[in-house]
Image (cartoon, rainbow, N blue to C red):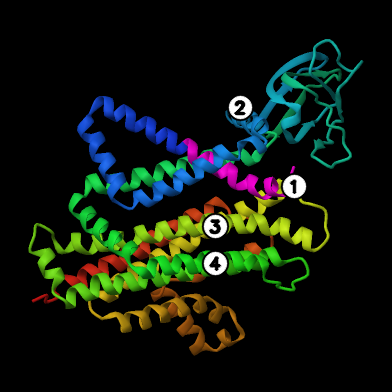
Amino acid sequence: MSKLTIWLTPIWILAVGVTIGALILLLMWGVTWLVNRRAARSIAEAVGEGILRPISYVVISMAALALLASPSMPVERIMASLKRLPDVAPIVEKVEVGPRKADVEIPASFRATELQSFTITSDQDVAVNVAAKKGFVEPLILVQGGEPYSWSPGSSTPRGFEGDVTTVYVTNESDSPANVSIQMYTDVETPQVRAIPIAAASTIGLYVLYLLVRFLAPRTSVIAAATAKETIAQPLFTMLVMIGIVALVAFVFIPYNTFGEDVKMLKTSGMTMIKVLAIIMALWTASTSVADEIEGRTALTVLSKPVGRRQFIVGKFLGILWPIVLMFVILGIVFLLTVSFKVVYDARESAKTTPEWTECYLEVVRIIPGLVLAFLEAVILAAISVAVSTRLPMLPNLVICGSIYVLGHLAALIVKSAAGEIVFVRFIGKLLSVILPVLDHFEIEGAIAGASSVPMSYLGWALLYSVLYSGAAILLALIFFEDRDLA
């Protein structure tokens, strides 16, 4: 496998998932066309006019990558594992085998090559086989009473099982009943394919979410689409995206002198770069789109139409979020490419053995939750910026939101530091933690340093926190804007 294939394979797997998601969307649109052509035309217009248009260009690029790179990728291995995904699941069985009972059947369908680990326990000596009438004469696995028989990759205990297994036979020759427990954990031979359905679902979810907002709240969606279109057309958006791409590529070749930890430094630097650029974009857009329109009487013109103040604020907030989503999609893909390439690049520079593509994949998937957390942080600051923009112009908005960004990261550290032992400092730190968003929750530097992954449960709680705080900020924006004199 060439070095190009090694670092490109993780991105190709994600591209396959995006392509599958796009095909499902096309199929859904085709069904809609057959059932309701008017709705199908509206969907096509929404995709062609809104933020989904540039997103679609990115999807097409990923689909092209999935197609063009396929000849050099392990397609058969990936597809074989993808087909097996619905069939792998933990096997937990408990059964009582009577005294001097032979060949008690326990249903356990699995492939031996897919075993990740298993444990068999019994309070009596039992023999475990995959065929009947062998018992203790030809035991595949002999389990001693009270001593669990455990196997995992790298252990000295023999695995025993081979080939495809459909039934496990347990024999008990003692005079007492045996309580047998079997716990088996299986996975496909290439577990990396689990990213494919996730990427497909994410692609479908992004399109469906946008279309739901468009059709359920049309007036709000019109304001959001106009704001997003205006934001993307601004030179600042293009400039920030180009700065991000150039910086992410440059980070690959910068010598960090960390004695083999350059990949971690790249991930930390890249994550911070993308987040800061997105926050700058959000603050700038909120100031120009909300504050300037209020000061320039443009908001009064918009509200003279059948558009309420609540629709105006929510529409502006969504119009700020859509360009941020596009920025994260573009820079996120570039970031994943650079991280994957950095693994191979560092191995070459350090004269180490060329890594496997699975090593590149592991580094890539560990930073995807970090991108999600960085996006949630940008959403919170965008909501705060919208609230501030209803009353203050650009410069105070930038100062206030910049201060919130700094204090939001420092409040938790102040409480935990030595200075936090001072009663007054500790009180101020806790007060800031209550009033301001605790942005330290959206950092994954600790996970990067420890080479660990962020659990899905953490992402769920972070999403809930982001939704609640952003909702509170938008509610505050509505209160500020409700009695604002626009004349």
Q: Earlier in the sequence, mark 2 or mark 3?
A: 2
Q: Residue at x 54, y 67 (%)?
A: 246
Residue carrying label 3? 334
Q: Which residue occupies 65% across, 54% down?
A: 340
From the viewer's perspective, is the residue at label 4 or at label 2 nearer? 4
Q: Residue at x 83, y 57 (%)?
A: 352
Question: Picture quarter containing residue 292?
Answer: bottom left
Badge 2 marks a residue whose secondary structure is: helix
**Residue 256: within the magenta?**
no
User: Is tag 3's residue or tag 1's residue first in the polypeptide sequence?
Assistant: 3
| Residue marked by disc 2 | 87
Q: CA distance from mark 2 to mark 3?
A: 34 Å
Label 1, on which residue?
356
Residue type highlighted by circle 3: Val
Label 2 crowd (10 A; few <14 / some 14-19 / many >=20): few
What predominant SS class does the magenta segment belong to?
Answer: helix
Amino acid type assigned to the residue bearing label 4 in the image: Val
